[in-house]
Image (cartoon, rainbow, N blue to C red):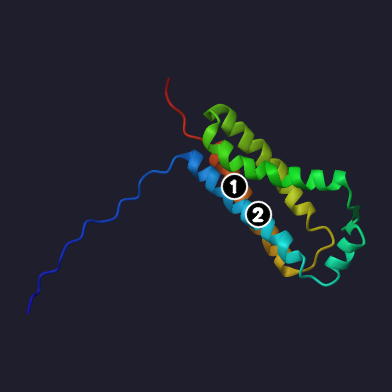
Amino acid sequence: MNTQTSSKPSLHDAPIAVQIKLAALWASFMFLYIYVDYFALYMPHKIEGILQGKVFVFEISQGFLVAALISVSIPALMIFLSILLPAKINRWTNIVLAALYIPYSLFNLAGETWVHMIYGAVVEVILLCLILRYAWTWPRTNQ
């Protein structure tokens, strides 16, 4: 009987650059942002409202759809921009946009009582707060 234990090297957690953390958080936010809206289509009377040309209190128009696309394209672009932009611009872009999307995510709850909508908004806000935290505490160099 062999009583020796094999010693495996321990796993190493490589440091992750703040840009990668931010990009991953924006990607997570985007998935949730899209799926919350997608699952809302399963709620009673949502499709009927859309077929009648209304979303919440808004008339569906070209302007509405452009605004909706802009609201989705900004976080989608931040996945790439969080990796591409220089540190100083990257930091402030992430801080400003995450701060703006927090009330926007909460506004999307107006009049909602469905738990999946509330849960989605809470997780979205947590992700945005993490973006704020990582951007705010961006590592500095002594130069």
Q: How many residues crowd mark 1 within 10 Å: few (<14), some (14–19), many (20+)?
A: many
Q: Which structural element holds mark 2?
A: helix
| Residue 136 picture location, percent across and down | 57, 37
Residue in view at x 14 percent, y 68 percent? 5
Quarter occupied by residue 44:
bottom right
Quarter occupied by residue 77:
top right
State which quarter of the image contains the C terminus: top left
Report which residue position mark 1 lands on. Answer: 26
Residue in view at x 49 percent, y 42 percent? 20
Residue in view at x 92 percent, y 62 percent? 52
- 1 left or right of 94? left
Query: Camera-side residue: 45 or 142?
Result: 45
Q: How many residues crowd mark 2 within 10 Å: few (<14), some (14–19), many (20+)?
A: many
Q: CA distance from mark 1 to mark 2?
A: 10 Å
| Residue 85 picture location, percent across and down | 55, 31
- 58 left or right of 92? right
* Disc assigned to residue 124: 2
In the picture shown, does residue 55 fall above or below 45? Answer: above
| Residue 36 visible in the shown view | yes
Total marks shown come to 2
Amino acid, disc 1:
Trp
Amino acid, disc 2:
Glu
Circles 1 and 2, Cβ within 8 Å, touching? The answer is no
